[in-house]
Amino acid sequence: MNLQQLFNMQKELDHFIEQTQNIQHDVFQEKGLALLVELAELANETRCFKFWSTKGPSARAVILEEYVDSIHFILSLGLLKGYTSIEKWPIVAEKRNLTELFLQTHKAILCFMEQPLEDRYATIWQYYGLLAYNLDFTFDDVVSAYMEKNKENYQRQRSGY
């Protein structure tokens, strides 16, 4: 499976949500904020910045689910702007300090939201590739978790989430 298949799945989900929720306005800003919130939730589950605590990170499955929540919004933002030509998962094998990486990713998202250019969108993907590598997630891990969460998102819409 490549990113094009994920873009297609996300396109169908976005259309379903728009129909179910009767969305009539541009939701670019809302999706951008949602991505930032999901990134923060991911950071919170890793606990990488919690120097004051001895409690370890959440279970790998919890962290992966939070990671995939972000992927939904990255795909969705790309669909809104027509930036769907990325086909391959960004493999960036470089160990980084997670706190710094989260801050850099946050900055990349904000830069894209201020000027939604395709190269800035690609930068977000690069940072998420780095995050995956540093969290020990493979593309297969991400795809499997994405597919599960995609099903859950449809169920949530059907049940009035």
Image: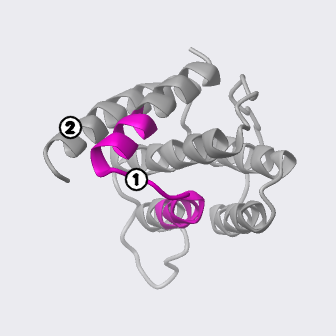
Q: Indicate the amino acid at tag 2.
A: Gln
Q: Is residue 124 above or below residue 155?
A: below
Dot 1 falls on a residue whose secondary structure is: loop
Report the residue marked by disc 1: 23
Q: Residue at x 71, y 64 (%)?
A: 113
Q: In x, y percent, where is residue 155? A: 20, 37
Residue 155, numbered circle: 2
> Disc 1 to disc 2, how far (Cα)?
18 Å
Q: Is residue 74 left or right of residue 86?
A: left
- Whether residue 152 is visible to the viewer of this picture, yes or no, is yes
- Considering the whole magenta stretch, tell me its main secondary structure: helix
Is residue 120 shown left or right of residue 35?
right
Residue 136 drawn at (x, y percent) = 56, 39
Dot 1 and dot 2 residues touching (CB under 8 Å):
no
Of residues 150 and 17, the one drawn nearer to the viewer in this rendering: 17
Query: Residue 71 location, x and y as percent?
Result: 53, 43
Q: Which residues are magenta?
A: 13-38
Task: Decide whether residue 30 is among the magenta residues.
Answer: yes
User: Relative to 54, is 105 above or below?
Assistant: above
Furthest residue toward bottom = 52
Residue 31 numbered mark, or none: none
Name which residue type carries label 1. Answer: Ile
| x then y, percent, for residue 41 | 44, 64
